[in-house]
Image: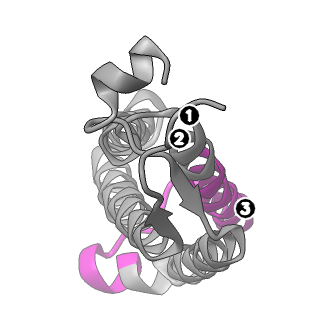
Amino acid sequence: MSAYRRRYASVVRVSSVHAGRLWNGGLSTSLVATCLALARIPLSRTVSGVWGGAGTGWYALGVEAAGLGATGLMHLLIAVSLRPFRVFAWVMALGTATAMLVPFVTAHGLARSTVTAGLNLLLGTGIATLVAGAARTAMDAAEPAGPDP
């Protein structure tokens, strides 16, 4: 057994993921988030009396891409990171915070930017939790590797 494996055998676990389950959950997450993004106009109009700040089609396409990108990131992190869920949570938190700040940089009014930022918070949090949940169900930890051949 290599010195590295002897030293970290109790800490390092080789993880495998059922890719079909992960991507099925990721596609479902993207579909739910896209439907919510498409429903944003009546929701924002009812709640605050203002329309959102971005075109609905482009916004929905961006949300779809964010959901699929988050799934791809999670798949990559499971393969290469020791703590994939912690790294994923940080990346998603920073991405969601950035998405919340972007509407305030545009030349739209404060009410419109606030509604869009709130929706970005809802969508970012939803995508992060649903993809992490799908990854937890798709992942099974293997036993630490035995001695080197």
Chain part drawn in magenta: 44-73
Left or right relative to 21: residue 135: left
Amino acid at pointer 3: Leu
Mark 1 and mark 3 in contact (Cβ < 8 Å)?
no
Residue 11 on image: x %, y %: 27, 36
Identified at 56% across, 34% down, the residue is 80
- Which of the two marks, 3 or 1, is nearer to us in this view? 1
Q: Residue furthest top?
A: 3
Residue 61 is marked as 3
Locate residue 67 relative to residue 112 in the image: left or right.
right
Q: Distance between the residues labelled 3 and 1?
A: 29 Å
Which image quarter holds the C terminus? top right
Circle on res. 77 = 2
- Give the answer, above or below, for where 107 lies relative to 139: above
Label 1, on which residue?
A: 80
- Give the residue displayed 49% in from the left and 46% down from the top: 14
Task: Choose top left, top right, bottom left or bottom right for residue 120.
Answer: bottom left
Q: Hey, what amino acid is under mark 2?
A: Leu
Q: Are marks 2 and 1 in contact (CB under 8 Å)?
A: yes
In terms of secondary structure, what is the magenta stretch mainly?
Answer: helix
CA gap, disc 3 to disc 2? 24 Å
Check if residue 25 falls in the magenta segment.
Answer: no
Q: Which amino acid does label 1 sit on?
A: Val
Q: Does the magenta stretch include residue 61?
A: yes
